[in-house]
Image: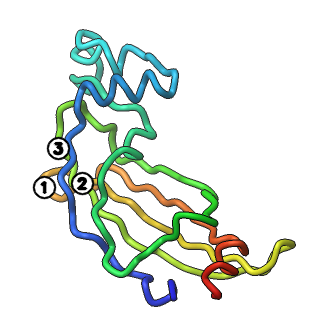
Amino acid sequence: MFKEMIGKTSNKVKNTVERGAVKKFAEAIGDMHPIYLDEETGRKSRYGANIAPPTFPRVFDYGVIEGLHLPNKGLIHGEQIYHYERPLLVGEDVYCYARVGDYYEKKGALGEMGFIVLENNGEDQEGNLIFSSKSVVILSEAYRKVQNV
């Protein structure tokens, strides 16, 4: 069911690194570093602007991968890894898309589990990669029983 989704990609969605959103995100994660919030600190930094916290791309819209239907129950967030070519600058537009990187199954102590590898990417207006992230979503045995998979 998920194996045929490998390689499928969403359309790119324009997101803006908004100052207010960065402030709220920094408050939510408890990291009030001036490089995220203080405009003078941002101007004087090597980036010439404020930047967003490393996990900020979590709030972006990555579009919809047609045909990929993840359930509301029985999912476990396995891991998430971010890679940056450069920081996200406050005020810039980022074009984001998602891709199904892999799907595999493993038998564990709790039964058969499925693993979906989702890749998220953000590019600048010229199509240069700014960041990528990879997350593993685990479909638990509970999900599989409900879905009769």
Q: Which residue is mark 1?
A: 126
Estimate the x, y position of residue 113 in percent, counting from the top left.
70, 76
Is residue 77 left or right of 55 when viewed as pictured? right
User: Which residue occupies the extreme top position in the image?
Assistant: 40
Left or right for 29, reference 52 = right
Q: Residue 104, position in %: x, y? A: 61, 81
Residues marked 2 and 3 touching at CB (< 8 Å): no
* Residue found farthest to the right: 109
Amino acid on which the number 1 mark rests in the picture: Glu
Residue at the location (38% across, 71% down)?
Answer: 99
Callout in the foreground (3, 1):
3
The residues tagged by marks 2 and 3 sit, at their Cα atoms, a distance apart of 9 Å
The correct choice, above or below, for 114 with respect to 58 in the image is below
Q: Secondary structure at mark 1?
A: loop
Which residue: 45% across, 90% down?
4
Q: Nearer the viewer, residue 147 or 18?
A: 147
**Is label 3 in a helix, a strand or a loop?**
strand
Q: Classify mark 3: residues with Cα within 10 Å, few (<14), some (14-19) or many (20+).
A: some
Residue 66 position (above or below residue 36): below
Q: Amino acid at mark 3?
A: Asp
| Mark 1 closeness class: few <14, some 14–19, many ≥20 residues within 10 Å | few
Q: How is the image coloured?
A: rainbow
Q: Is residue 144 left or right of residue 68?
A: right
Query: Residue 68, position in %: x, y?
Result: 40, 77
Q: At 33% across and 41% down in the image, what residue appears? A: 86
What residue is disc 3 on? 93
Left or right of residue 39: residue 27: right
Residue found at the far left of this picture = 126
Residue hosting label 2: 123
